[in-house]
Image (tube, grey):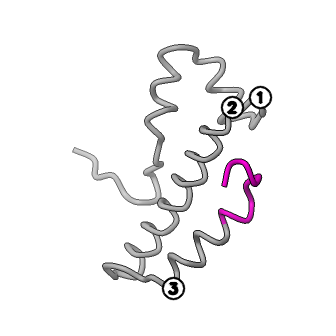
């Protein structure tokens, strides 16, 4: 059995996997071609929260720490500053 290494592993969002079942073409346009369509406020908020948590989790795993509140604060600030006021 072949061992999977970190360099060959790619994360995938559950929403992307569910979208493949509904419409593979839309997944191609969104994730490969980076086309933007209409995005609801709740989707923008969810994406920002997901991205912040993913970055923070990756940081903690990489640095082998249970928590790093200074990094968490800077991560939240970074993502909050990039979303529209109504999303924040």
Label 2 Cα neighbours within 10 Å, binned few <14 / some 14-19 / many ≥20? few
Label 3 sits on a secondary structure element that is helix
x then y, percent, for residue 25: 65, 17
Residue at 73 percent across and 65 percent down: it is: 81
Would you say the residues marked 1 and 2 are in contact, meaning their CB atoms lie under 8 Å apart? yes
Label 1 – label 2 distance at C-alpha:
8 Å
Task: Give the foreground label among 2 and 3.
Answer: 3
Q: Main secondary structure of the magenta part?
A: loop
Q: Quadrant of the N terminus?
A: top left
Label 3 – label 1 distance at C-alpha:
35 Å
x then y, percent, for residue 49: 54, 54
Label 1 sits on a secondary structure element that is loop
Q: Which residue is label 1 attached to? A: 37
Label 2 – label 3 distance at C-alpha:
33 Å
Above or below for 72 versus 23: below
Label disc, if present, on residue 70 of the rendered structure: 3
Q: Earlier in the sequence, mark 1 or mark 2?
A: 2
Residue at 77 percent across and 28 percent down: it is: 37
Q: Which residue is label 2 attached to? A: 30
Residue 58 is left or right of residue 33, and the answer is: left
Q: In which quarter of the image is the C terminus?
A: bottom right
Q: Residue extending furthest front? A: 86
Residue 53 is left or right of residue 85, and the answer is: left
Above or below for 54 versus 38: below
Residue at 51 percent across and 52 percent down: it is: 50
Task: Read off the magenta span.
Answer: 79-88
Label 2 sits on a secondary structure element that is helix
Above or below for 83 versus 81: above
Task: Give the foreground label among 1 and 2.
Answer: 1
């Amino acid at each position: 059995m072949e061992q999977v290494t970190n360099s060959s592993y790619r994360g995938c969002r559950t929403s992307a996997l569910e979208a493949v079942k509904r419409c593979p073409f839309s997944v191609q346009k969104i994730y490969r071609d980076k086309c933007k369509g209409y995005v609801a406020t709740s989707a923008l908020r969810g994406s920002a929260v997901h991205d912040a948590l993913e970055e923070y989790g990756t940081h903690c795993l990489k640095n082998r720490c249970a928590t790093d509140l200074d990094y968490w604060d800077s991560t939240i600030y970074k993502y909050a500053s990039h979303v529209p006021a109504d999303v924040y």
